[in-house]
Image: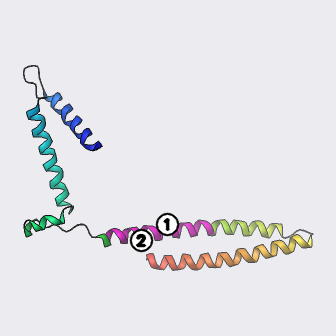
Amino acid sequence: MGMSVIITIMVGFGLNAISSEEHGYVTPGPLWALLLLTTVVFTLVGWLRGAYPSAGYLHPSLYRPPPSSRDVKSKSIEFDRKRRLDKYIREREQLLEDLRAFTDRSTTSNPQRKLYYRRRIDQTRERINKVNEEIHRLGSEVA
């Protein structure tokens, strides 16, 4: 409903722009004619894009299939796969930075801290291996 108000106002502005002092076009006749023409154009564009498959009930030649939802779905799946791949790559970079930091910190003389950082290093390496497997799996699916 909001778009109909905006379209009506824009049609009125267009009629006002082509009006002169002798010929005023912002009257009910031209306004209705242009609004009807705009409706027909938008309906035709929608039909060409496949928005009205039920028009085939009127006549079989009017049937236009809607865009394949499989194409839209496959594009969405591809985008999601690439997004997950980027997420895993960023996570791997962060894990490698953490691994460097833990390695530097594990050289302390405190045995408890050494043990703590050794465990963190092992956990980080395990997670890096899992992330690498996911990256490899997603990379082979994309290719």
Determine whether 48 is above or below 3 in the image.
Answer: below
Instruction: Give coordinates of residue 54: x percent, y percent.
Output: 16, 66
Instruction: Give coordinates of residue 13: x percent, y percent.
Output: 21, 31
Task: Name the side, left or right, on which 124 lies relative to 71.
Answer: right
Tag 2: residue type? Answer: Ile
Instruction: Give coordinates of residue 98: x percent, y percent.
Output: 72, 66
Tag 1: residue type? Answer: Arg
Residue lying at 47% horizontally and 71% vertically, measured from the top left: 81
Q: Which residues are magenta?
A: 71-91
Residue 34 occupies quadrant: top left
Residue lying at 33% horizontally and 68% vertically, measured from the top left: 72
Q: Where, quadrant-wise, is the N terminus in this rendering?
A: top left
Which residue is label 1 attached to?
Answer: 83
Q: Where, quadrant-wise, is the C terminus in this rendering?
A: bottom left
Residue 97 occupies quadrant: bottom right
Which residue is label 2 attached to?
Answer: 77
